[in-house]
Amino acid sequence: MFKNLATVTLPGLALCLLFSCSSKKNTANSETASTDSEATAGSIKLITLDPGHFHAALVQKTMLSQVDPTVHVYAPAGEDVQEHLKKIEAYNNRPEDPTQWKETVYTGPDYLQKLVAEKKGNVVVMAGNNARKTEYIKTAVEAGFNVLADKPMAINTQDFTQLKEAFATAKEKNILLYDIMTERFEITTMLQREFSQLPEVFGELQKGTAADPAITKESVHHFFKYVSGAPIKRPAWFFDVTQQGEGIVDVTTHLVDLVQWECYPEQIIDYNKDITINSARHWKTTLSPSQFKKVTSLTSYPEFLQEGVEKDSMLGVYANGEINYQLKGTHAKVSVIWNYEAPEGAGDTHFSIMKGTKANLVIRQGKEQNYKPQLYIEPAKGTDLKAFETSLKNSLAKIQANYPGVEVKQFKDGWQVEVPEKYHNGHEAHFGQVMERYLKYVGEGKLPEWEVPNMLAKYYTTTKALEMARGAK
């Protein structure tokens, strides 16, 4: 179906998958990094590089005034790019608030070189197969493009070395390299961070121990689930850790990011001095042939997955991982677990606890919470509950100044934070929020000073932990 040197345009409401050659140039799209003090209407021209993950489409789920509706896609021919275009088509065709994207797609074998040569935009979005992700980032940055990349930006220590070089080049060229950290926009996480900044309620963050960390985060994900109302179809390479990355360097990226973001907000972290990894481990999730077929639509395992096939034709994937480490002397533990499918009525879940000298801040998302994240404030043992309640209610105005309508109600072990429904906008909406924040930075021409060193600290933690987990066999 796909032809070399092929280009296709997706205008508004129609998707054509029959690609034809096009030599037209758009000189208006030839600039690279924006240095304007603010991004004006249509000044951001997106390029999507090799989309293979649904996150690539989610950044386009809504229109933004700064973004030109024409998006140039460069990718190898195949099912990944087709699936991406189908999602964009669905956004364009939805009955409520349809988008108006016009996708111009190039699928020649020299797609990466073509992207660099044509310079059709100023922001490159990457979300897909991670085997070449760091190489893509480095190439795009060296060519002068701003880059918004899905996690992970590095899946091993070799990639981390390349990533450091990419950040150095970005600094030299005054362009912005940034990753998509959607979990910073989850309201219970945001409020956990806010309450931890109230010494009269939280006290001070404990230091903890390796056996009893001061902060623990656990994320449970599922291979089969629904995205934008439809069953997800995952590419076979998603189950190959050399292409997707192990769980300990993939989803764990979010957890490590949140530990840094919540424990030491807006503080620079130096991975050479501030991080000590105590232990790391990884383990497999197994899928049956029928489960693999349901989530990929494939009737057999491709050759590159054969190494992971175990007895009874079960496929073992190193999707799970745990890191026990210290950040500026604070003990933290993060873990990611992948199951095949969630229980009825459930989805991906998150657990988090921050331990303060006066109270613990706990996010739970289990059956008792109807699988919706809830934040609890649990006073330390021996606390005078009446005095604590007075401090809590006196301090609540500081939270309400930024989050009007947030309240607390007492329950058996403390207080539950009641959050108005308007703040629960869902995981998919967070991609648009990340994009909006990133475009603000592009318009300003800079990231906050702590973001780059903390991204490096994050990927040092995950890739070093992977190295340790594999060495621990």
Image: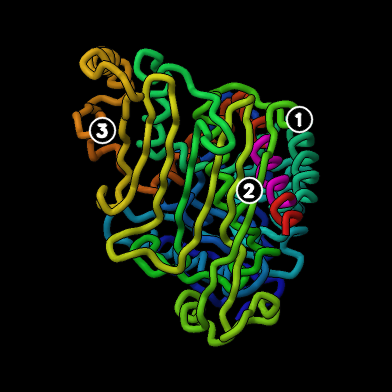
Q: Earlier in the sequence, mark 3 or mark 1?
A: 1
Q: Earlier in the sequence, mark 2 or mark 1?
A: 2
**Secondary structure category for the residue under label 3:** loop
The residue pinned by badge 2 equals 124
Where residue 422 sits in the image (x, y, percent)? 25, 38
Q: Is residue 422 left or right of residue 38?
A: left
The reply to whether residue 72 is in sight is: no
Please report the residue visible at 19 percent of the width from the left and 29 percent of the height from the top: 410
Q: Nearer the viewer, mark 2 or mark 1?
A: 1
Viewer-nearest residue: 213 or 180: 213
Please report the residue visible at 55 percent of the width from the left and 40 percent of the height from the top: 333
Residue type at mark 2: give it: Val
Q: Is residue 279 left or right of residue 369?
A: right
The residue pinned by badge 3 equals 413
Q: Earlier in the sequence, mark 2 or mark 3?
A: 2
The residue pinned by badge 1 equals 272
Magenta stretch bounds: 456-467
Quarter that holds the C terminus: bottom right
Q: Residues within 10 Å of mark 1 (few under 14, many from 20)?
A: few
Q: Is residue 241 magenta?
A: no
Q: Is residue 464 magenta?
A: yes
